[in-house]
Amino acid sequence: MEHWPALVVVGANHKSAPLSLRENLMVEEEDVGALFNRLRHAGVTQALLLSTCDRVEIQTIHQDAAAAATAITTILADNASIDPSELAAGFYTLQGAEAARHLFAIAASLDSLVIGEPNVLGQVKTAHRVAQAAGMIGSDFDRLLDAAYSAAKRVRSTTKIGERPVSIAAAALDVTRGIHGDLGSCSGLLIGLGEMGEMVARRLTDGGLGRLAVTHRTARRVAPLARALDANVIEFETLDHALAGADVVVTCAGLGSYTLTADALEAALKARRRKPIFVIDLAVPGDADPAIEDLDDAFLYDNDDLEGVARAGIAHREAAAEEAWRIVDETLAAYHEDRAGRAQAPDADALRQRIDALRRDILAETGGDQEEAERLIRQLFQNDGETSQ
């Protein structure tokens, strides 16, 4: 007997559809309630909506997978103002065990654009809360999601899938911590207004960097960025002096000449009594004089260096994914076994009720002779078993 819930998953993700289509399909937070109402009207009374940059899909408990898929596809297409036929190539429909494994993989960050991405589980839990608040989650669905969370917790705690940085910004934070340890007492200096520089600076501050200053050749342009990063503004003309107070320097000025010279770094290191300076050069061509690498207590990384750290992190996570999949499949099997036990429980309850009813009847006929009643019940079920054979 099949003991999987009638789970149906319909949608598109980073593997099945291009970003342009996924962006078009995304459901804004304020539109989720209306979407759920349309699903109810179409007969889809349970639904979990995942609408992120990686995927837009709806998961439902429904006895008719084809009908559910048609309704969901039509509603998502209408919400995006496109014809449902345009979704045929990018949409998938999964059901039963395959759908359950897909859900578990999402929660465990195995089906993400970046394997091991830590925020995916939070996205699933948020979607769960929203669906619960809208009355779109039944008890079977709740139990399935709880099992998925259990698998995700085991994957996160017993494998190395979340270790190692897999982006340039994350790699920059990882290397900075390797050089300076706890960043709470460290100061950072961002030179320039490049998008990648801002991203790295933000990752450093989110990672605990104590203080950040920003400078740019055009003073009026740096103020908005400084406000956005909660950073101080340093006059560009005082850059060489400011280097002495910086534990990590992120440069993306791209002026076509060396913004950071080896002489300036050498002077800053002397003023710091040889306390290390980590320079992250994100400019192309570079802002930092390559001779900085020859200085004691100076560390220089460019885009290629950080990309190498990120690639190593990706390979590390992919190696850990095999163990993570084993955990997912083990948890799925345990869930399936538990569900099978729940399915059999009503039969056991019915048997107990039948025995109790027989006991009452026989006790009434034998004048309350408990021993005789039990003997007759055993005999009855023994004869019933022989007859069934």
Image (cartoon, rainbow, N blue to C red):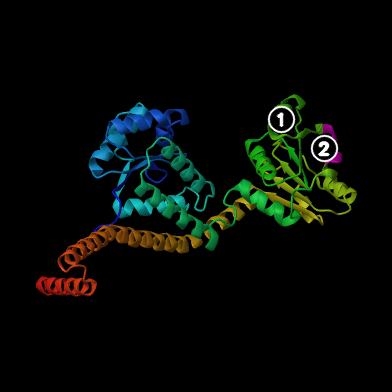
Question: How would you rate the neighbour count of disc 1 (Cα within 10 Å): few for under 14, some for 14-19, many for 20 or more?
Answer: few
Q: Is residue 1 magenta?
A: no
Instruction: Give the residues drawn in magenta, as a range.
Output: 237-242
Mark number displayed over residue 263: none
Q: Which residue is drawn at 62% across and 49% down?
A: 170
Task: State the residue at coordinates (40%, 43%).
Answer: 13
Residue 265 visible in rendering: yes
Tell me if residue 195 comes above or below residue 113 in the rendering: above
Dot 2, crowdedness within 10 Å: few (<14), some or many (≥20)? some
Q: Which of 3 and 94 is in front in this view?
A: 3
Which amino acid, by three-letter code, is at mark 2? Answer: Leu
Q: Is mark 2 on a helix, strand or loop?
A: helix
Report the side of 131 relative to 209 (left or right): left
Task: Name the residue beneath numbered marker 1.
Answer: 227
- Pinpoint residue 63: horizontal percent, then vertical percent: 24, 45
Question: The residue under label 1 is which amino acid type?
Answer: Arg
Q: Name the residue under label 2.
A: 239
> Residue visible at 47% across and 64% down?
323
Which one is earlier in the sequence, the residue at label 1 or at label 2?
1
For image coordinates 74% across by 53% down, the residue present is 182
Q: Which of marks 1 and 2 is in front?
A: 1
Relative to 373, is 260 on the left or the right? right
Taking the magenta stretch, the answer to whether it contains residue 240 is yes
Counting from the top left corner in percent of width and height, residue 117 is at 52, 50
Give percent across and percent down for residue 109.
48, 52
Q: Nearer the viewer, residue 196 or 119?
A: 119
* Residue situated in front as seen by the camera: 269 or 233: 233
